[in-house]
Image: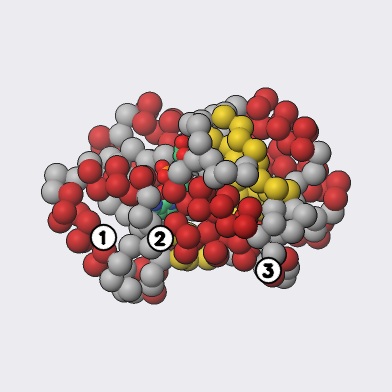
């Protein structure tokens, strides 16, 4: 029970990586506030249906909890277009959820974490933030921003008990990945090509990402801050 007695917020907890993370943190003894714009969260979570870009909702939720030990920012979207085909609406929507939503929830949680002198923040970027990626300009740019934000938070609050680390998943079997493959001209070929980029020869599972998030959210990683942890079947090694 590595999270016994801890209060944790997981954004994007109604699906995929966020769902798996909320489930694992619950199983490890945490009280979990699941935040998502769509209904549904693992049984046992408290659910807040909200857009992560809603600043007032974030502040109110954190105030009502009073104490937050860990925050996991898994809410994210992808529009899947090269830059030349990206509209300003696409760009702003992706930046709003992936970057501004991460900023808003980190800022809200910093207050109780600073009061307690302790807290762990885990952001979800992507291996594409480092490797680059085709046909997803706004998304890849947003994930680069998430990595940069993670490091600046880690540095600014390192002496005040707050850690901030990024997980960089490879392609993980979630509804987001299914939607992304469905957008390809030949989804089967896109799937094979993406699998082929992973030295392990397969996609990852949300539960595998959740276990790395647990490590960073818990006291097991007490001397770890500002890192980018790839959970990508070896993608970034190649
Ligand atoms: N699946 C992958 O291959 C993969 C790879 C690298 C990184 N990631 C990242 O992992 C995170 C989770 O992705 P996933 O694959 O589980 O996706 P998903 O689509 O299965 O789940 C994302 C969740 O975020 C929620 N969400 C989206 N926009 C929101 C908003 N504005 N406010 C509140 N909730 C919102 C959705 O409702 C959904 O429940 C994302 O940040 C994604 O970019 C995913």
Residue topped by disc 3: 221
Does 42 sit above or below residue 215? above
The C terminus: image quadrant: bottom left
Hey, which residue is sitting farthest front in the picture?
A: 43
Instruction: Give me the residue at 82% from left, 48% from top.
Output: 114
Given residues 115 and 49, the one toward you in this image is 49
SS state under label 1: helix
Residue 86: quadrant of the picture: top left
The N terminus: image quadrant: bottom right
- Can residue 129 be seen here? The reply is no
Name the spot of residue 160 as percent of width and height, x first.
Answer: 82, 56
Does 227 sit above or below residue 94? below
- Neighbour class for label 2 at 10 Å: few (<14), some, many (≥20)? some
Q: How many badges with numbers are in the image?
A: 3
**225 left or right, relative to 162:** left
Q: Distance between the residues labelled 3 and 1?
A: 31 Å
Question: Is there CB contact under 8 Å for labels 3 and 1?
Answer: no
Instruction: Give me the residue at 25% from left, 48% from top.
Output: 181
Instruction: Give me the residue at 66% from left, 46% from top.
Output: 32
- The first of marks 3 and 2 along the sequence is 2
SS state under label 2: loop
Q: Does the residue labelled 3 lie within 8 Å of ligand 1?
A: no
Question: Is there CB contact under 8 Å for labels 3 and 2?
Answer: no
- Neighbour class for label 3 at 10 Å: few (<14), some, many (≥20)? few
Residue topped by disc 2: 205
Q: Distance between the residues labelled 2 and 1?
A: 14 Å
Residue 118: quadrant of the picture: bottom right
Q: If the picture is divided into quarters, which one holds ligand 1?
A: top left
- The first of marks 2 and 1 along the sequence is 1
Point out the frontmost of discs 3 and 2.
2
Q: Which labelled disc corresponds to residue 194?
A: 1
Name the spot of residue 132 as percent of width and height, x first.
Answer: 36, 56
């Amino acid at each position: 029970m590595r999270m016994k007695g801890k209060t944790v917020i997981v954004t994007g907890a109604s699906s995929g990586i966020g769902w798996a993370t909320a489930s694992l943190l619950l199983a490890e003894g945490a009280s979990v506030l699941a935040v998502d714009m769509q209904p549904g969260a693992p049984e046992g979570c408290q659910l807040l249906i909200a857009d992560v870009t809603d600043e007032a909702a974030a502040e109110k939720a954190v105030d009502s909890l009073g104490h937050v030990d860990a925050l996991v920012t898994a809410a994210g979207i992808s529009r899947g277009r090269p830059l030349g085909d990206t509209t300003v609406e696409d760009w702003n929507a992706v930046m709003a959820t992936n970057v501004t939503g991460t900023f808003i929830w980190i800022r809200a949680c910093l207050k109780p974490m600073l009061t307690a002198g302790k807290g762990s923040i885990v952001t979800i970027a992507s291996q594409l933030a480092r490797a680059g990626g085709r046909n997803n300009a706004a998304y890849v740019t947003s994930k680069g921003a998430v990595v940069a934000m993670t490091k600046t938070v880690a540095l600014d609050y390192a002496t005040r008990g707050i850690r901030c680390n990024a997980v960089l998943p490879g392609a993980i079997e979630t509804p987001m990945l299914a939607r992304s493959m469905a957008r390809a001209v030949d989804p089967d070929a896109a799937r094979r090509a993406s699998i082929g980029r992973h030295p392990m020869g397969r996609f990852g599972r949300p539960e595998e990402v959740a276990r790395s998030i647990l490590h960073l959210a818990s006291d097991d990683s007490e001397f770890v801050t500002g890192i980018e942890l790839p959970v990508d079947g070896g993608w970034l090694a190649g």
